[in-house]
Amino acid sequence: MNSVIDTITGHRSVRKFKDMDLSNEQVEKIVQAAQSASTSSFMQAYSIIGVTDKEKKKKLSLLAGNQSYVENNGHLFIFCADLHRHFTAAEMEGKDISASLETTEKFMVSVIDASLAAQNASIAAESMGLGICYIGGLRNNLPEVCALLNIPERVIPLFALVVGYPDQHTEKKPRIAFNHIYHKNEYKQDMDIYKKELEEYNQVISAYYQERTGNQRSDTWTAQMVGMLEGKSRLYMNEFIKKKKMDLR
Amino acid sequence: MNSVIDTITGHRSVRKFKDMDLSNEQVEKIVQAAQSASTSSFMQAYSIIGVTDKEKKKKLSLLAGNQSYVENNGHLFIFCADLHRHFTAAEMEGKDISASLETTEKFMVSVIDASLAAQNASIAAESMGLGICYIGGLRNNLPEVCALLNIPERVIPLFALVVGYPDQHTEKKPRIAFNHIYHKNEYKQDMDIYKKELEEYNQVISAYYQERTGNQRSDTWTAQMVGMLEGKSRLYMNEFIKKKKMDLR
């Protein structure tokens, strides 16, 4: 189609990187791309922490579930939902807007703003021949992450983005069919069709795993999701977010 | 740098479109781009509703604060955080995972997944010469939006994305400086420097408005934010999300 769409649709997560750091220019380009994303009411309700300190990267790697690529990569970005900036702005203006900042609506704004910025960063990095992987495992231990990086109230680290020169070739996993993810004029009402579409997707995923593992693995998408979701994870999150003075009411 | 980064950094929101619909091929390319984004644990926890029905678009435009470009555009996408699919998957597997789906963690996953997908869609659209605008105003009236589009429990419309052939040229608003949004190895601790950076940004924004309006407007970023945030908006959100069986615990 065009090189932008080729970059976007060519995305694969990369979990093994060459031992080469990103240059300052690369980091700046990636952050500039992040900042070019749309932002709700111009709030720019996020921050990015770039971690290069080796000891901190090692600790973050352990906190995120001992994933070696959190330590070994070209650069580690942490994307945070951030309303601390707005709280400070209000202080500078001699006002108190904490009640507004503590609403679920503003929490959502900050999560959305940070995510839009992160995806721009990802695409920009991939366009430069770099590989990326989102690290949701960072949310395993957010209190420790916040202590390690001195993160104040009203700031929530959402995920890390590791970036670097790829040292592996990975495959694209087939996504849910267009007809299932995309609804026309209303959310699909016929649950028989809805389930049939998921069954068809199960066959696609099962065939993908079979081919990839020489028939060692053949699980379906629904079985995979339900197996994973039966284990309730990160149950501290609700209380943690509230302690950070977000999503309170 | 390269055409991908040029597309990303060249982003401007477009709020006036020519009277031309997107083709099915364009819609499919945009959704395919959205689906190529990373997704937490392969959950793909979002849905996209494409609204072409003229009556529904008119109603959505009114619900979103009477913004004409919500009605008049090439295509209207609504991005939803979606855990209904996973609830259904569990039904198909004879399991109950509702307690897991009701956690704040899974709410965050669905908001992040939907946002990453939306930003890919935006960049893809812009790479095709189309303009885009996010419509957070959709969150003014989510119960009505859900009723209009028959949206089930565990699905939250987060924002609309209007796409079309631009019929205006808009300017880029200067973003917060790199040094302020980007923190090195820890969140910036010196509040004097932090505030000084915001004051410097205030001057940039004030000069931008002055030049753009012939000195009719000169408000700073902190004043603009605080003025906007003093009005607590969308206070129903917390209760609404919980009624949808998300972010409960």
Image (cartoon, coloured by chain):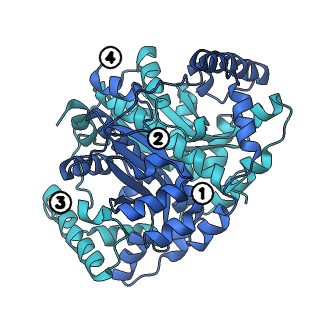
Chain colours: A blue, B cyan
SS label for mark 3: helix
Q: Residue B248: x percent and y percent?
A: 73, 58
Pointer 1 local density, CA inside 10 Å: few below 14, some 14–19, many at least 20: some
Q: Nearer the viewer, mark 2 or mark 3?
A: 2
Q: Is residue A172 visible?
A: yes
Pointer 4 local density, CA inside 10 Å: few below 14, some 14–19, many at least 20: few
Residue B116 - label:
2
- Tell me what residue is drawn at x 86 percent, y 32 percent: B94
**Badge 2 and badge 3 both on one subunit:** yes
Specify whether A35 is left or right of A172. Answer: left
Residue with the mark numbered 3: B208
SS label for mark 1: helix
Label 2 marks which chain's residue? B
Give me the C-alpha separation between circle 3 and circle 1: 42 Å
Where is the C terminus of chain B found, in terms of image quarters?
bottom right
**Badge 1 and badge 4 both on one subunit:** yes
The number of callouts visible is: 4
Specify whether A50 is left or right of B151. Answer: left
Q: Residue A101: x percent and y percent?
A: 51, 69
Badges 3 and 4: C-beta atoms under 8 Å apart? no
Q: Amino acid at mark 1?
A: Asn
